[in-house]
Amino acid sequence: MLLRNILFSNKKKDILFFSMEMIPYDKRSGKIWFNGKAVNWQDAQIHVLNHGLHYASCVFEGERVYDGEIFKLEEHTERLFYSAKRMGIVVPYNQKEINEACKNIVNIQKIKNGYVRPVIWRGSEMMAISAQKNKVHVAIATWEWGSYFDPKLKVEGIKLNISKWRRPAPNTIPWDTKAAGLYMICTLSKHEAEEQGFTDSLMLDFEGNIAEATGANIFFKSEDGQLHTPIPDSFLDGITRRAVIEIAKAKNIKVNERKIAPNELEKFVGCFLTGTAAEITPVSKIDKFDFKVCTLIEELSNDYQNIVRKKSAA
């Protein structure tokens, strides 16, 4: 019931979110932190001959703002720098400077409940596979943002198909980063799911085991009340995923991190996604398998909201 009340209380915020989503991102106003300065939104531009655009030498983060504060900012920035290092990108700022820049742009934009997108990419000095001499650019944008999925689906649950695309083997890509190129198959999978009438897509890993959704980690609930989630050995170990595991363990709920085969889907009674954007989103169907939006999922979602909104609750 509390989850439903939270959704009702956020109705105006979600209306604002959907109305804002109708405005293309390049047509919005305000400021963007761009290479050390807060510039006008329309002036945050790059050249079409850009290495990050052509060769995906780009890393980024996605962060949530709750009641004016960025949730787990330090962890996101740490992962951003880890991703850059894995991609051979030397960031021209330190982590403290990026943390302060994120906070400053949120304050400038007067964001209360929204999203923050730091992004790092190689520029236009060289246009070839090699980019050793390309300048590294950094930008941070933020905007008001409500629910990633349709808010009513937080109660009813979303539906997933099973993607034909798989997460590649970990020795073929920098799998544990938020690098732009890793999301190509996510977009393909998401589009395919939407064309088939689903909300999102379940992706398997290179071995055929369950991996994740297109932009979120996945959990299952068994009849005995335990949670099961895939081992993140070929996909990103989400910050929200780790937070949910901590919440579950604090409630004395056993969490099994293990390999999960697709043929186990019929044995589970509940399912949900976790992610900075998705937060905790129930799943009602995967392919032909149905799941209940059970009390445990609602309790975890409520506990998560209490944590991220601890400032207002204090």
Image (cartoon, rainbow, N blue to C red):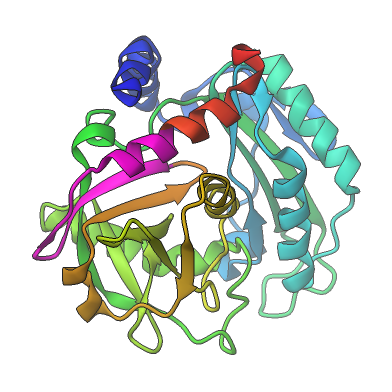
The answer to which quarter of the image holds residue 55 is: bottom right
Residue at 29 percent of width and 45 percent of height: 282
Q: Where is residue 81 drawn, in percent x and y?
A: 78, 57
Q: Where is residue 189 drawn, in percent x and y?
A: 29, 65
Foreground of the two, 122 or 48:
122
Residue at 34 percent of width and 43 percent of height: 296
Foreground of the two, 279 or 147:
279
Left or right of 5: which side holds 196?
Answer: left
Asked if residue 313 lies in the magenta stretch, the reply is no
Q: Is residue 75 above or below residue 29?
A: below
Left or right of 15: which side holds 119?
Answer: right
Q: Quadrant of the N terminus?
A: top left
Q: Is residue 144 above or below residue 194?
A: above
Asked if residue 293 lies in the magenta stretch, the reply is yes
Q: Where is residue 83 drawn, in percent x and y?
A: 71, 64
Report the magenta residues as a range: 278-301
Residue at 60 percent of width and 60 percent of height: 178
Q: Quadrant of the C terminus?
A: top right
Residue at 64 percent of width and 39 percent of height: 45
> Taking the image as drawn, is residue 214 in sight?
no
Foreground of the two, 224 or 146:
224
Total numbered labels: 0
Q: Is residue 86 above or below residue 2?
A: below
> Taking the image as drawn, is residue 127 in sight?
yes
